[in-house]
Structures are given as C-alpha cells and as structure tokens.
Amino acid sequence: MTRRLARRLRSRLAGERGAAAVVLSLLMVPMLGFAAVAVDVGALYAERARLQVAADAAALAVAQDCARGACGDMTATARAMVAANDDDAAAAPPVLRSAPMSVTVTGRTPVQHWFAPVLGQDSTAVSASATVAWGAPGSGTAVLPLTFSVCAFTQQVGGLSSTTPTTIRFTKTDGTGCTGPSGNAVPGGFAYLDTDPGRCQATSARTQRFTSSTGNSVPSVCTSADFSAQLGRVVLLPLYDQVGATGSNAWYRVHGYAAFKLTGYHLGSSQFRTSPAPCSGNDRCVAGYFVRYVDLSERFTYTPDGPALGASVLRLIR
C-alpha cells in the first residue's frame, strides 16, 4: 500500500514538473519582451541623451566659427565634436540656413540590443539634431557705461581686419563733424549712460532710448578698478543713432553694439588713465580696435536682424 502511494505521488510530481516547464517556456517570450522594454528601451533613451549633448556641442562649435566670419570645414568640425562626446556616433554634414543665420548638426548611431533580438529586433538607429542661430546683440548689460555715435565711432575706428589700437575721442573733441557746433551730441552729455543702481554698468536695448549721465566725469559709482579690469578684453559698446532733450533728461537711441578690444583710456583724473594715455589735456578718450567677437554669456539677448558691428550672440534654438 505504502509503495503504491509513493509511486503515485512520484508520478504526479513528475507530471507537474513537466507542466511547469511548459508554462515557463510559454512565459519566456513575454518575459524577454518585458526585459527588452525595461533594458533596451532604457539604453535607447540614455544613448539619445548622449547623442543630443554631442549634437549641441558640434552645432555650437560650427556656429562660433561661422559667426567669426569663417565657417571653415564644417563637416570636419561637426564630426570631431560629435565623436569627442559620443565615441560610436557619426555626424551628417551640417546644414546652413540664412533666415535666420543658423546651422543644424545631426548625429546618428546604431544601438545594439540585449534582449530585443528574441523579438526580431537586433538594433535601432538613434539620431539627435541641434540648431544654433547667431545674430547681433539685441539688449543687455554693457560692462562700461559708455556710448558713442555710430557716425563718430565708424569714422575713428578701423575696419574689422585692423588690430592696430586707435584713439576714440568723446564727442566734444572728436573732430568728426558728426555733432553740432557745440561738439556734444546733446547739451550736458559727453559719452556716459546712466548706470544701473549701484553698479558701474549700463543696461540698454536696441531701438530704445536711454538717458545720459551729465558731465565730463566718470559716473560716481564707477571706480578705477571697474575700468582697469576691462583692459585687454573685448567690451560691447552701445552705439547711438538718435539723440534728444538736454541735461539729465537727454537720451540716446541705441542703434547696436560694437565689439571693441579696450587697450587704454584717458577719462580725466589720474585714477582713470592708463600709462601711456591715448590722449591728454582736456580730451576724453578710449583706445582699442574693432573686432569680431562671439559672446557666449547670458549678458546679451540675441536678435537676427541687428546691425553687423562685430559682435555676435549664439543661441541654441533646437
């Protein structure tokens, strides 16, 4: 009796094991499908994120070259930047557009799957694109509260190809004939904008009016360190094309922003003067030269239709 019961039990267990194997084999396909979703799809998202960073970097690099006036070998630049950020990726030839000025870079790479081959999917092609536009500064904060007329500035500064420092005199003594008989663009105004509260800087915007700081002296909020800190650097100077009113009510209309490498200045007192000074006596002046400059900071906004005065701002617009 006992032996018969044992044989029956073993027979039943063997049958259940066989049934379990059948059930497990039937469940393997959906289980692998879920694994494919969890692992392989996750890998796709991770790879696309890496590829997007690579495309962004490549588009920014090509746009910087183009904004400086020489795009160079765009394809080589794009491929090098994509490969530097994603070893397995390749970049398609960049696409340039003119309205607005922009460049698009697309990176591509195949991603091999771990589990999806069970479902007949060995790999998936992943791509990411980035578009960077460039244009003139539209508004922002100039690190020095100076302004010059478009007329006087362009007459006193050499072209973009010149790197020889030139002396740019303030309106009273610039001798350009761009102002009235008094020499000043507006009565009581020389070359200074009203500063931002407590800061030796001036925030302005194209086509808008900004008030003049009266007098022939540096605004009181400014220190010698504010000016000396900008020596040898490129500063964006607002240039005006219209003026109006008088004294503390006088205003300048900002035409655009020139990229100017500051090499010296003479602003009256000895603390606001470089050695050697670019001018002397009662003259007020700065020295430097006009350059092509790409501003990558957030100090200025981008506009596609501003005047070409050497300065460009890049913006990722993907």
Image (cartoon, rainbow, N blue to C red):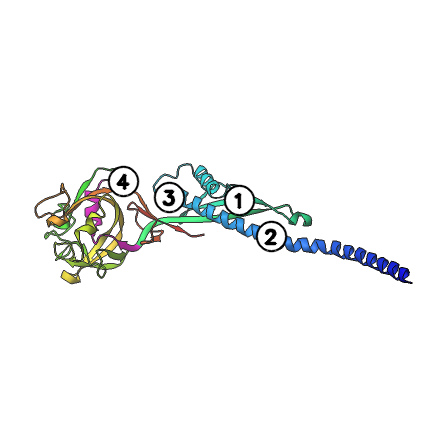
Q: Please tell me whether mark 4 or mark 2 is closer to you in this view.
A: 2
Q: Nearer the viewer, residue 222 or 187?
A: 222
Whole-angstrom CA distance, mark 4 to mark 1, is: 38 Å
Q: How many marks?
A: 4
Q: Is residue 157 magenta?
A: yes
Q: Which mark is residue 39?
A: 2
Kind of residue sitting beneath label 4: Leu
Which of the two labelled residues, at mark 4 and mark 1, occupies the earlier sequence position?
1
| Number of residues whose C-alpha sits closer than 10 Å to that of mark 4, classed few (under 14), some (14–19) or many (20 or more) | some
Q: Secondary structure at mark 3?
A: helix
Tag in front: 2 or 3: 2
* Amino acid type, residue under disc 1 in the picture: Arg
Mark closest to the chain's N terminus, 4 or 2: 2
- In which quarter of the view is residue 11 placed? bottom right
Amino acid bearing label 3: Gln
**Residue 48: image x %, image y %?**
52, 49
- Which label belongs to residue 108? 1
Mark 4 or 3, which is nearer the eye?
3
Find disc 4 in the rendering and name its residue. 160
Q: Return the residue at label 3.
A: 64
| Residue 278, horizontal then vertical, whole percent | 14, 42
